[in-house]
Amino acid sequence: MSESQTPTREVARRVFAAEFNDATHTFKESDDERAPLYALLPTGERVNRVFLVGTLTETEDIGNENEYWRGRVVDPTGTFFVYAGQYQPEAATALRELETPTYVAVVGKPRTYETDDGSVNVSVRPESITAVGEATRNRWVVETAERTLDRLGRFDEEGNEYAEMARREYETDVNGYRDAVVEALESLEAEPGEDAAAETVS
């Protein structure tokens, strides 16, 4: 059957920048060279693809011989860095042509890079970058808050293997991500006319 021959795409997970940038541990679940590479979220979820929405505040071509674009996408909790070059032509074109600041939706894969001093930076290799409106950004904030709280609610459940892995790999107080959720939702309430969006999580 065609279903068994065609690998299914991983679900793009919603995650705030504050947590995503702490997801420095990556792993595969098999020795197959084509096996997907996962980033481990500190709240106990594996992610192969992410879906984020925020304000594209800055773009820059940092390539030498070929174009290689870096974009900064800001959500209420921090900054995502996205990088697109010749192998992500549509995303690179978007970073080249979009005005800043503007709201964008990004689907992509998490990538980690170890710096010379041994720290690990986390970024996104985008599959797509699309300009969106404020309502889409606000809905993403609310839905990402809900997903984060769901992960936190399952964190201490017996048999949650990814939470157990997160405890081993990270020395992180996950309650900090609950604070990030509150901060994100309060940012919506602070914007005129956005009270209704924030109230949907109460």
Image: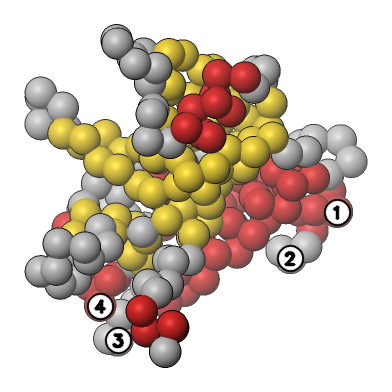
Within 10 Å of disc 4 (Cα), the crowding (few <14, some 14-19, many 20+) is few
Disc 1 marks which amino acid?
A: Ala
Q: Is residue 90 above or below residue 29?
A: above
Q: Which residue is mark 2?
A: 202
Residue 176 located left or right of residue 188: left
* Image position, residue 31 (x, y; %): 10, 69
Horizontal side of 109 relative to 96 (left or right) equals: left
Location of the N terminus (image quadrant): bottom left
Q: Which residue is mark 4?
A: 161
**Mark closest to the chain's N terminus, 3 or 2:** 3
Kindly give the residue lying farthest to the top in the view shown: 64
The three-letter code of the residue at mark 3 reads: Glu
Which circle's residue, 1 or 2, is located before the other in the chain?
1
- The local secondary structure at tag 4 comes to helix
Amino acid on which disc 2 is placed = Ser
* Mark 3 element type: loop
Residue carrying label 3: 158
Looking at the image, tell me whether mark 3 or mark 1 is earlier in sequence order.
Answer: 3
Q: CA distance from mark 3 to mark 2?
A: 27 Å
Q: Give the CA distance from mark 2 to mark 4.
A: 29 Å
Whether the residues at callouts 3 and 2 have beta carbons within 8 Å, the answer is no
Name which residue lies at 62% across and 19% down. 97
Viewer-nearest residue: 138 or 136: 136
| Disc 1 from disc 2: Cα separation | 10 Å
Q: CA distance from mark 3 to mark 1?
A: 36 Å
Q: Secondary structure at mark 2?
A: loop
Disc 3 to disc 4, how far (Cα)?
8 Å
Which residue is under mark 1?
196
Q: Amino acid at mark 4?
A: Glu
